[in-house]
Structures are given as structure tokens and as C-alpha cells.
Image (spheres, rainbow, N blue to C red):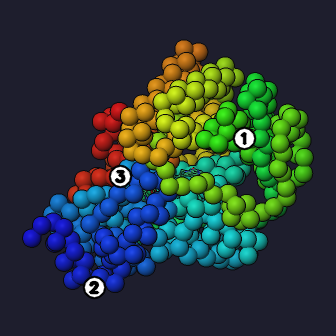
Amino acid sequence: MTIEQSALANLKNAGLSEITCLPGQQSYEDRVSSYWSLTAQLRPWTIVQPRTTQEVSETLKALVSISGCKFAIRSGGHMAWAGANNIEAGVTIDLGLMTTTTYNPDTKIASLQSGGTWAQVYSELEKYGVMVAGGREGLVGIGGLLLGGGISFHSCRYGFACDQVINYEVVLADGSIVQANKTTNPDLFSVLKGGSNNFGIVTRFDMVAFEATDIWDGNIVLSKTATEEIIEAFVDFEQKLNEAPDDHILAMWTYLPQTKDHFINMVLTNLDGVEDAKSLQKFLAIPGQKNMKTTTMAKKLVDFVVPSGKQDTWLTLTFDLDARIMKKAADVFEVLVEDLKILIPDGKFYISMVLQPLPRSFAKQSRARGGNLLGIEKLQKDCVLLVAAVEVETPEISTKIAYPKLRAAISEIELYAKSVDGDVGFLYLNYCDGSQDPFQTYGEASIRKMREAMAKYDPSGTFQTRVPGGFKISQMGVRN
Ligand SMILES: Cc1cc2nc3c(=O)[nH]c(=O)nc-3n(C[C@H](O)[C@H](O)[C@H](O)COP(=O)(O)OP(=O)(O)OC[C@H]3O[C@@H](n4cnc5c(N)ncnc54)[C@H](O)[C@@H]3O)c2cc1C
């Protein structure tokens, strides 16, 4: 028997046929096409969709017992690079049926199954008048975001989203189901805060909830001629954010095929629903098309869904909060857009470069909650997190044009940041392409913790060798 035949036979013998779908079946095709990026839409031998933690455990045991059988783990399917959350020659364990969110008013803890979306979570929690710090786009998954850190609207108040997780339910490589928190398996607890899929399959995240409030939220569409004013306002805003953690911003340099030129989309949110908040005044004063309103997180996320179904490349970089580097990034973006207009037939591409604050206070908030693996406290400065994404129509354009051009642009910004002593050497895992190496930037202490936890909780290296997708501790230094 081939490995594929053995895998299917084992799943059947384990009584899992009902949750297993095969190529050609509608359920299989629907799940493949539900990955956010076309780039990630690989075709595994079969997709298994457990409904319970017990079924995750049985699936894992059935697959691990076949020598050489590889598999992938998927929650929301939003990581854009091929193989992060899916596999060609193997089985995909898809948590997309495990979407329940519950709230316990006595403990003020929300329990989130891994396969849900943030839009679902927020809608459910607002019924109880509470909220958690999670994703900022409606359809992003719970599992991937929380295991990679998680930047939320509330990061200025609570650090990374993973800092608000107080307990994980995890299925380990041998199929055992364990809890990981401050007192039970604390070493596993600490490495799940940024360690991605290297230790087990997390089925449930228990998170601290807080009171839900109205937010004052929306965007301003600005001309690229406002670049310097926006950068000045951004620097001022981020410095003040350390002391007054009341707002959230994203500065998105954007080019769409239907626009002749790129523009800047400033997304602004006051977390307490204060209209015309003083802290956002510098942005609001720049002439542009304003669309601001009072709403709630749940309502915002229903509308806030980034279109999918393209070939995507994402790359990330972090540097000092320094107007010169931000201006350089804007200049490099402008040249990149002009190059791509020439190189890509019919100008059919979408590109954005998002700058977001990563102030010192995020690390302080994380530390106050026990800390995470990301190692940002070593930065000791206010920083800017850049993520750039290009979307194109075909894999050829993606690999031959979009990827090398974006890569070169990011390298140019990085080189400039180094030249002004502003490169901080941190890569945020959830924004990384598969060619980037986020774990190496976490620092020695985090790397040591991950290696120790791996040896203890997955001594046979199942999540290194049998789950090849995603960022692997054992592959650190091999990427690039
Ligand atoms: C449109 C869009 C908006 C985004 N917005 C944000 C944002 O606001 N903040 C932010 O921080 N990031 C954001 N991201 C990045 C996002 O956090 C990552 O893409 C994240 O991986 C998505 O989570 P997911 O559940 O969809 O992951 P998937 O793509 O399903 O998985 C990502 C990785 O995590 C692993 N994994 C997933 N679930 C589990 C599990 N239960 N147990 C073990 N391993 C698991 C997978 O194997 C894979 O390697 C955004 C991405 C997109 C495309």
C-alpha cells in the first residue's frame, strides 16, 4: 500500500470517514477554495474536519501511526504562502468545523475554538457586552493569529492578543489532550505565545474578556502628496500612544488596478467611541475623504473583509520610529508601483504597504501579562511594523515578477534602515513570507525555551518532520 492508501485506510478504521472528504467531493472543493489566498490552495490527499477535540486526537493518532505520512494544520486559512497551512502529498487537518465561542460571566473568560473567525467571536461576545483582543479583519482565523502573536485594535492596552490567553487546550503528537496554563504545563503555555504549530494542535483558547464599548472608527482616503504630513502625524501619534493608549491606526499605501495612482488609506479607531478624538486630530486635519462613524467591533468586522482569491506575496520588516525610514519606504513603494505597472500586463495587480505602530508600550503590556516569545521587549524603542502585500492573477506573475520585485523593495528599505542605525531585526511571524525566518529574531532565550518544550512535549519531532508547513524551529537559519 502507498502512504496515501494507508492514511485513508487508517482514517476509515478509526471511524473518521464521516469527517473525511476527498478530491472531487463538493465539501473538499469548497474547503480548498476557502483559503484566503490562491497561493495557499493546495490539493491534499484528503481533508479531515474534526468536530471535537477528541476527533482531533483520533485523527492525529491515525496519521502519526503511518510512517512517513505528512499532514498540515489549518484554522482560518489566511496565511498566504503555499504550504503554511496546507499540503500536496499529505492530509490536511482542517479545524473549520470547530467554531464555537462561549463566555463565562463568572470568570469573565471567553473560550474560543480554533476554527472560528474574529467576526464570529466578536458578534458572540458583544451579546454579553464583552470583547477580547483579537484580529482586525472579519474572516481571519483564531488559531493562526493567536499562535503567531496577534496584533489587535487593543494592543496598546493589552499587548499582543496571545498575552490575553490564559489557557490552551492542546492535542499533543501522541494524541493526548492537555491543558497549558500558568500552573499546568507552564513551559508549554509559554511557547504557545508565538511558537505557532511546533508543539501541538490547539483546539481551544481561553482569553480574558473586557467590557465592550462603542468605537469611533473609519478611514480617510488621502492623496500621496500628503505623505510627509502623514508621517509626521504618525510619529507624533505613536510617541503619545505610550502614555494614552486610546486609539489604533493603520497607514496603508495602496494601489488598485482601477486607480491610476496610489493613495494612502488611514484607518483610524478611537477605542472608547470618542468622536473627533484629540489624539487623532493631526490625521483628521489633513484634507481627504473622511468616512468616520460610531460603531462596535463586531459591526466593524462584518464590513471589514479584505478581498481574497488572488496569488499573494507578503513580506514584513520592522524598523525604528524614524520619519526618514518611513519616507524612504514611501519612496520605494512609489517606484515599485511604477515598475509593476510596466511589468504586469493590463496593470492587473493590487499592492499595499501598511505601516503600523509598534511602540514600547506593547512590550510593557505583554510583560505585565507574563510575556510572550516574540522578544520585542529587547527592542526598547518605539518601532514601526511594515507589511507589504502584492496580489496578482497568475502563479507565473507571482513568482517571476511580484515576489522578486517586492523582495528587492523590502531589502532596499532594510538596507536604508541599517544605514541610519534604525533596523531592529524583528520579524512578525504572522506577516512573514515562507522565505523569512521570524524565530531567529525572537532572541536566544525564546529559542532555548522552544527547543526545550519541543524535546519535552514532542520528543519524536512529529511537528517538525511530519507537519512540514509553517515556520519550524528545526528549520531556523535554513530559510532565505
Ligand atoms: C486579510 C488579513 C488580515 C489580517 N489581519 C491581521 C491582524 O489584524 N492582526 C494580526 O496579527 N495578523 C493579521 N493577519 C495575519 C494573520 O494573523 C495570519 O495570517 C494568521 O496565520 C491567520 O490565522 P488563521 O487561523 O487564518 O491561520 P491559518 O492560515 O489557518 O494557519 C496559520 C499557521 O498556523 C498554524 N495553525 C493554525 N491553527 C492552528 C492550531 N489550532 N494549532 C496549531 N497550529 C495551528 C497553521 O499550521 C499555519 O502554519 C491578517 C492576514 C490577512 C490575510
Does label 2 or label 3 sit earlier along the sequence? 2
* Quarter in which the N terminus is drawn: bottom left
Number of marks in the rendered image: 3
Characterize the local packing of mark 1: few (<14), some (14-19) or many (20 or more) Cα atoms within 10 angstroms: many
Work out whether 222 lies above or below 16: above
Q: Name the residue that disc number 2 marks.
A: 15
**x, y percent for residue 429:** 48, 44
Question: Going 55% across and 31% down the picture, which residue do you hit?
Answer: 341
| In-front residue for pair 351/111 | 351
- Tell me the amino acid under the disc marked 3: Gly
Observer-nearest of 32 and 365: 32
Is residue 353 at least partly visible in the picture? yes
Residue picked out by circle 3: 83
**209 to 307, vertically: above or below:** below
Q: Tell which tag, 2 or 3, sits nearer the viewer.
A: 3
Dot 3 or dot 1: first in sequence order is 3
- Split into 4 quadrants, where in the image is the C terminus? top left
Residue of label 1: 265
Q: Is residue 125 left or right of residue 63?
A: right
Q: Position of residue 58 (x, y in %)?
A: 30, 77
Residue 465: x percent and y percent?
A: 24, 53
